[in-house]
Image (tube, grey):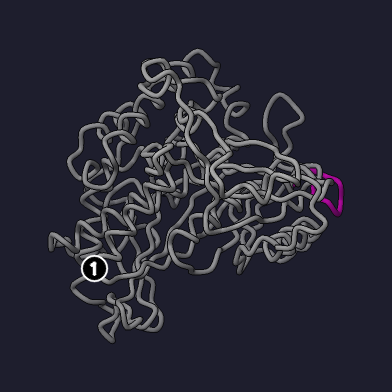
């Protein structure tokens, strides 16, 4: 983007919860960003959801709360169209003074997984479906937003309703324009099942870029919603009687010649696709913490509500955790449907792609695909509560093959601290913590 009209800019990296942590800088500092002059404490990427240091974290007092070096990612600056002042955001990554990638940076975790694909001569492409709610947060409880055309609160469900899309046309049009300016490949938009719930699909791209898109898209939706007098949230279930919000990840893998390694010319897919499915299923229960990282995340896992609760796969079946979509064989891919909208996209893609790679490297064998309703079947289950998810992630051997020991330690310390503090907050007030933090 051209910086000619930019008056200020921000630099930010993702913490373990996917929140942006960084600084606001004057325009004059932009040309020096790649010189290693931007420093932040390493611990800032491993704080809890409220921004508090993690008790007993080795990143704080044990090491003197040392600084790391922030360096720009390949993304470069993107505009922030939801702000009145012309501003830019520069996505960053964290390194040590010696140039070593910081293990607590979730973007590096995904980059490490993708490097293993590159070592096999493979490239991963991913497309992401982003579900979110627009809500009214002006009262003591969250409520559906007003219909911008009538000024009355939304009443009826409007799944796939063009009328609902048209009612929010000003907001959605501004989102599309901002996506174009930010180089986020927004595709179709639908009105989803919940009151005030929408889904915008982000087109397939190289996987690291796709994770960047999802991370930036969350900031865009929250900022643009405020500009339009609402709140935008990716909470997995912000309204207790409405549908949950997920983040479905579609991915495929190409070889050095650009051929899709999942394509066998027919609907079944190659043995490598089946191995990848097997890896995803094997790691799924222990990965629950990444797919459902917060206490309220588990409200979404309700049987029969289009949020998978059991580890299974199927062709063209949306009750399954892993779906193999139909269509042209050249586009054969896996859709991973487990993650809630309140996740960190870098960690989610690392967990999914790391598990798939293990399945392909180890030649894991997938069970037969299911047919019918997955909720009526006796299946290996995802972890059903936060503590079980933390404990499984902490000790599982497959997780240890995907993530570094430092990230596993820091994430589980973070989640244990959050669980302890959240227990002191009345459940009816939990939304005040998570509304725009996830």
What residue appears at the point 63 percent right and 63 percent down from the top-left corner? 190
Who is closer to the viewer here, 222 or 58?
58
Residue 196 in sight in this render: no
Horizontal and vertical percent for residue 82? Answer: 76, 49
| Image quadrant in which you'd find residue 275 | bottom left
| Residue 119 in the image: above or below residue 289 | below
Which element type, helix, strand or loop, lies under badge 1?
loop
Apparent side of residue 140 relative to residue 373 in the rendered image (left or right): right
Q: Which stretch appears magenta?
A: 146-154
Residue 246 in sight in this render: yes
Horizontal and vertical percent for residue 270? Answer: 22, 76
Give the residue number, with chain letter if any, for mark 1.
120
Apparent side of residue 291 relative to residue 199 in the rendered image (left or right): left
Who is closer to the viewer here, 334 or 153?
334
Horizontal and vertical percent for residue 409? Answer: 31, 29
* Quadrant in which the N terminus appears: bottom right
- Say if the magenta span includes residue 152: yes
What residue appears at the point 41 percent right and 44 percent down from the top-left corner? 99
Who is closer to the viewer here, 82 or 382?
82
Q: Alpha-carbon neighbours of circle 1 within 10 Å: few (<14), some, or many (≥20)?
A: few
**In terms of secondary structure, what is the magenta stretch mainly?**
loop
Apparent side of residue 56 relative to residue 281 in the rendered image (left or right): right
What residue appears at the point 26 percent right and 77 percent down from the top-left corner? 269
């Amino acid at each position: 983007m051209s910086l000619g009209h930019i008056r200020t800019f921000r630099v930010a990296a993702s913490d373990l919860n996917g929140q942006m942590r960084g600084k606001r800088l004057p325009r004059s500092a932009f040309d020096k960003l790649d010189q290693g002059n931007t420093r932040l404490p390493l611990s800032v990427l491993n704080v809890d959801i409220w921004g508090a240091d993690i008790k007993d974290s080795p990143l704080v007092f044990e090491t003197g709360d040392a600084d790391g070096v922030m360096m720009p990612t390949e993304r470069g600056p993107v505009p922030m169209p939801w702000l009145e002042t012309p501003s830019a955001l520069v996505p960053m990554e964290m390194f040590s003074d010696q140039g070593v990638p910081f293990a607590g940076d979730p973007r590096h975790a995904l980059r490490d997984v993708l490097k293993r694909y590159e070592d096999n001569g493979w490239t991963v492409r991913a497309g992401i479906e982003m579900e979110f709610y627009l809500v009214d947060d002006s009262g003591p409880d969250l409520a559906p937003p007003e219909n911008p055309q009538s000024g009355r609160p939304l009443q009826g469900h409007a799944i796939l309703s063009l009328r609902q899309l048209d009612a929010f046309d000003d907001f959605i049009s501004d989102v599309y324009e901002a996506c174009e300016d930010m180089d986020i490949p927004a595709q179709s938009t639908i009105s989803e099942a919940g009151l005030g719930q929408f889904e915008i699909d982000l087109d397939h791209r190289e996987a690291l870029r796709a994770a960047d898109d999802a991370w930036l898209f969350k900031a865009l939706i929250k900022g643009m919603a405020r500009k339009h007098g609402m709140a935008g949230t990716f909470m997995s279930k912000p309204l207790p009687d409405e549908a949950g919000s997920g983040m479905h990840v579609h991915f495929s893998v190409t070889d050095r010649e650009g051929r899709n390694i999942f394509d066998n010319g027919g609907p079944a897919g190659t043995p490598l696709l089946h191995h990848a499915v097997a890896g995803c299923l094997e790691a799924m229960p222990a990965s629950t913490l990444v797919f459902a990282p917060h206490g309220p995340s588990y409200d979404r896992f309700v049987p029969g509500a289009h949020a998978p609760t059991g580890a299974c796969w199927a062709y063209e079946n949306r009750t399954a955790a892993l779906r193999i979509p139909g269509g042209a064989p050249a586009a054969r891919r896996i859709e991973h449907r487990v993650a809630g909208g309140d996740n960190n996209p870098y960690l989610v893609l690392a967990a999914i792609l790391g598990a798939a790679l293990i399945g392909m490297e180890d030649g894991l064998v997938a069970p037969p695909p299911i047919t019918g309703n997955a909720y009526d079947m006796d299946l290996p289950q995802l972890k059903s509560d936060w503590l079980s998810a933390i404990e499984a992630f902490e000790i599982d051997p497959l997780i240890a093959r995907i993530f570094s020991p430092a990230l596993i330690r820091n994430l589980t310390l973070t989640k244990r601290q959050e669980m302890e503090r959240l227990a002191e907050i009345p459940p009816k007030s939990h939304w005040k913590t998570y509304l725009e933090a996830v």
